[in-house]
Image (spheres, helix red, strand yellow):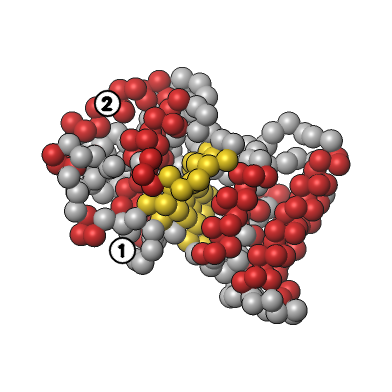
Amino acid sequence: MRALPEKPWFMAASFASLIAGFLLISSFLRLGGDRNLLCSVAGPPATGSSVELLTSAVLHYATSSVTPQQSRSEIRISYSVLRARSPCNFLVFGLGHDSLMWQSFNPGGTTVFLEEDPKWVQSVLRDAPSLHAHTVRYPTKLKEADDLLTSWRSEPACDPARAALKGNTQCRLALAGLPNEIYEKEWDLIMIDAPRGYFAEAPGRMGAIYSAALMARNRKGAGPTDVFLHDVDRKVEKAFAAEFLCKKHLVEGKGRLWHFRIPAVPGNETTASSGGGFC
């Protein structure tokens, strides 16, 4: 979710135009083509009205020389799902220059960001104070990925048939210390674009992928959970996606982004106790 190096002004302007168009089209479609769409909103989120979010996002990207890390084709995948499901509950692992865009794509819904670096959180919120973000600590390191991938099945606390996230300190992959808000809500969409996973001491995304899969399986509400995983060109993301998000749930992919649609497991029935795992 961090920014790429600055690009020429005309590329930033082109991207800003795309985002502005996306925002307006999204509102127009959701409101049934009402020509007064900017005066009619689905319902104000806690951080301000939908109109304020939209205009703030357009202004932000129109005046910034920094472009989001995901490509246009990657963004279109998540945007199309948000357009269909918004207002919804949207959980994003990562906080960056594209966060205001994601929040604006979900007017009337709840969009929450999780970020590992408290200084980065302060920096982003200074420019976009309407964002709802938490600083979180990840218990893993990237260098542990191979061991975590092979050993989780031998830990009963990781078994998807009975595992919980909150307070689950026995399962090394479970994100046990997140804010209560994360456990109390059911998330319709989950985007995994953090934490950092490109050097040995980095947290890696192993816990985020496992925890997103468990949240999706345990969903009680109607419908599936849409999970978006970025940087699938990397070994760890690809391996943990196959283990926990499951190839059979892969809907589409563009560039370095994969989109999974994961159904809930009724009654949390599973064959995991006999070695079936998540897939």
Taking depth in this image into account, of 149 and 173 the one nearest to the observer is 149
Q: Which residue, as the protein is rendered here, is positioned at the far left?
A: 274
Question: What residue sits 17% from the left and 36% below the top?
Answer: 275
- Whether tag 1 and tag 2 are in contact, CB under 8 A, the answer is no
Dividing the picture into quadrants, the one containing residue 203 is top left
Q: Is residue 254 left or right of residue 64?
A: left
Amino acid at the residue labelled 2: Thr
Residue 270: x %, y % from top left: 19, 49
The residue at 37%/52% (across/down) is 262
Residue 33, placed above or below residue 56 = below
Point 30% across, 23% down: residue: 147
Which SS class for mark 1? loop
**Label 1 vs 2, first from the N-terminus:** 2
Q: Looking at the picture, how far across and down is residue 214, in whole percent? A: 32, 48
Q: Residues within 10 Å of mark 2 (few under 14, many from 20)?
A: few
Residue type for callout 1 = Lys
Give the SS element for disc 2: helix
Answer above or below: position of 11 versus 32: above
Report the Cα–Cα distance between label 1 and label 2.
29 Å
Which corner quadrant of the image does residue 183 belong to?
bottom left
Q: Which residue is mark 1?
A: 220
Check disc 2 and report the residue beneath it.
Answer: 150
Q: How many marks?
A: 2
> Is 239 above or below relative to 228?
above
Looking at the picture, how far across and down is residue 91, in whole percent?
48, 53
Q: Is residue 97 visible?
A: no
